[in-house]
Image: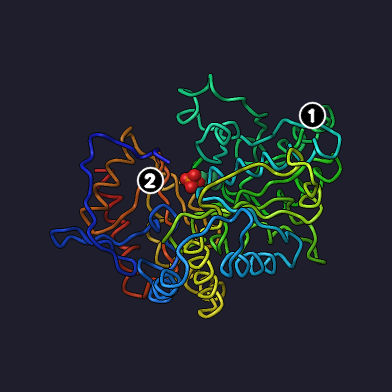
Amino acid sequence: MQWHADQSLPLLAVSRAQGAWLYGPDGQRYLDGISSWWTNLFGHSHPHIVQALRDQLDTLDHVMLAGFTHEPVVALSEKLSALTGGRLGHAFYASDGASATEIALKMSLHYWRNRGRPGKNEFICFAGSYHGETVGALAVTDVPLFRDAYAPMVRGAHVLPSPASSAPLHALDALTVFLEAHHARIAALIIEPRVQCAGGFAMHDASWLSAVRALCDVYEVHLIADEIAVGCGRTGTFFACEQSLDADGEGWPDFICLSKGITGGTLPLSLVLSRPDIYAAFLDDTMARGFLHSHSYTGNPLACRAALATLELFDALDILARNRVWGDRFTDALAPLAAHASVRRFRRAGMIWAADIDTPHADFSRRYYRAALARELLLRPIGNTLYFMPPYILDPDQTALLAERALAALDAALA
Ligand SMILES: *Cc1c(COP(=O)(O)O)cnc(C)c1O
């Protein structure tokens, strides 16, 4: 994720971090309003996660997972399965989000091959989608800046209109028409439920997700929910896709990808959850029918322990309920910013707030970033879209400070 890379900005040295604050070597501090690229859910160095990691480091640092198992990976897999009511009862581990995307794509394609339908080997993504930047993940990423230079390496997917790029009903029609014609070639459709974050914080209703799920059922296409950014409570429920379930709790995707927040921003870990029938398609004595994605650090015990400690905090602090209350307060605190003459389409999904800024400055993002740093804030707009994805632990003073200074930074950046 290098979309903010900008050679004209000096590198900021960070020597330590505590709670929501990053500290520089010379005593500067920055309130981390974007949770260090959406990873750091409970602030930096949360004592519960730190203690869990210390204990784990004293017990088992790492062991290969092929032919071995260990308590943190078993406990984490069971906990994640329980969070889906057992519907996505199997977990496959990697270390970064892009690999989780690729694992889900590979597993879907290989599933259809094992089921005697090798022709189902193409993928659908939506306009403005972001699923990571390795070569396989770029195939389903519709952000030209990241893809164009590497296009000759990439086997592109089918990019269909999203509810943000066209009217929702038109997007649904386009998907229906496409699936009707091409479903025999399509293994899976990948979606960022509720919010396309890196693509500019386009938000859609949960009803769109339900409609997509229904179409995937009709046309026998896997649904992959990329919850790398929107999972872990970010949109109000633990998994964003829970918002699209029916009254019986049905309508889960076939795969869920998680990463970013799952270790509370301490260690790299990603995972793909899948349905039991998908897992079952790979149970075979022949190696070539098994799922093939070897990774040296798969299921690393330290990362799994950090994830368990993170999930424990969700329960211990009743985070989803707490976030609802805090989120409404923060929305109130942002009211003056939302009413600013240059702000368009102020929007919110759970713990994500975004607004498009009407500005003549082509370098608005950089100007805002600088203006925010000068006010002790870490906020980095994507293009002209200013957004907030704060850690879940801001106290009332920090909440007020973030909202007030974000507004002051806006006036400074527009001046
Ligand atoms: C960040 C992100 C990824 C890629 O994760 P990395 O760990 O940076 O590879 C994939 N999908 C979404 C939705 C993301 O936000």
Q: Secondary structure at mark 2?
A: loop
Residue displayed at 50% across by 75% down = 313
Q: Nearer the viewer, residue 144 or 372?
A: 144
* Residue lying furthest top: 152
Q: Position of residue 248 (x, y in %)?
A: 82, 66
- Quick one: label 1 or label 2, which is nearer the N terminus? 1
User: Number of marks in the image?
Assistant: 2
The residue that appears at 25% across and 63% down in the rendered structure is 16
Between 399 and 71, the residue placed more toward the observer is 71
* Residue 77 relative to residue 33: left or right: right
Say if residue 197 shows up in the picture: no
Where residue 9 sits, quadrant-wise, is top left
Give x and y (percent) for residue 293: 62, 43
Horizontal side of residue 71 vs 55, given as left or right: right
Mark 2 — residue?
A: 381
Answer few, some or many: residues within 10 Å of disc 1's Cα (few below 14, many 20 plus, some between 14 and 19): some
Model colouring:
rainbow
Q: In this view of the protein, which residue sits in the foreground, 296 or 18? A: 296
When the figure is inspected, residue 27 is found, relative to residue 130, above or below; the finding is below
Q: Residues within 10 Å of mark 2 (few under 14, many from 20)?
A: many
Q: Quadrant of the N terminus?
A: top left
Kind of residue at badge 1: Arg
Say whether mark 2 is within 8 Å of ligand 1.
Answer: no
Residue 267 sits in which quadrant? bottom left
Instruction: Name the residue that disc number 1 marks.
Output: 185
Q: Quadrant of the C terminus?
A: top left
